[in-house]
Image (spheres, grey):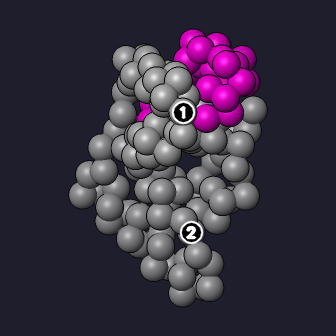
Amino acid sequence: MGIILDSSILIAGERCGDSVWEVLERVQTVCGRTVAALSAATAVELTHGIYRARADSDRLRRQNFVEELYQAVPVYPLTLEVARLAGRIHGEQMGLGVSIDFPDLIIGATALHLGFDVVTLNVKHFRLIPGLKTVTL
């Protein structure tokens, strides 16, 4: 078993000045020793944040944090299996009138496909995905 890290905990840690290793230690304190990974959708969100920075110093700090993160944990791609699972979840939930943000849908589907939980500060959005276990810090 493992965990997929949502961008919310990573962004919060980076904004507080924590290193990647400090964020990962906090996750281990809550989740125990487990495999931590990212969804490709989280990589998109983090890269987006780098280029939204207004100051060069913020951009560089974010870039360094993200590069260190990519060295520390694997990034799972959006595979055909994950895409099909996400499409099924999205179709079923939309049929019930439930809308799920696309990045959260991909992150959640990646976790479900792998049998992982999602660690997030945004439990409200991920609870919309049936069968997905979430952990908050």
The amino acid beneath tag 2 is: Ile
**Quarter of the C terminus within the rendering:** top right
The quadrant in which residue 91 appears is bottom left
Residue 26, image x, y percentages:
69, 19
Instruction: Inspect this view and state whether residue 39 appears.
Output: no
Residue at the extreme left of the image, as rendered? 80
Residue 6, image x, y percentages:
56, 41
Identity of the residue drawn at 63% across and 56% down: 126
Identity of the residue drawn at 46% across and 37% down: 50
Secondary structure of residue under mark 1: loop
21 versus 101 height, above or below: above
Q: Is residue 45 left or right of residue 70?
A: right
Residue 52, image x, y percentages:
49, 45
23 versus 96 height, above or below: above
| Callout 1 touching callout 2 (CB < 8 Å) | no
Q: Mark 2 or mark 1, which is nearer the start of the sequence?
A: 1
Instruction: Inspect this view and state whether residue 7 appears.
Output: yes
Between 66 and 3, the one lying in front of the other is: 66
Look at the image and say whether residue 23 sits in the magenta stretch: yes
Q: Few, some or many C-alpha atoms within 10 Å of disc 2 (few <14, some 14-19, many ≥20)? A: some
Residue interval drawn in magenta: 11-39
Look at the image and say whether residue 47 sits in the magenta stretch: no
Identity of the residue drawn at 55% across and 28% down: 58
The quadrant in which residue 22 appears is top right
Residue 63, image x, y percentages:
44, 26
Identity of the residue drawn at 40% across and 46% down: 44
Between 9 and 97, the one lying in front of the other is: 9
Please name which of the two marks, 1 or 2, marks the residue nearer to the observer. Answer: 1
> Which residue, given by chain and number where applicable, does mark 2 sit on?
100
> Which residue, given by chain and number where applicable, does mark 1 sit on?
55
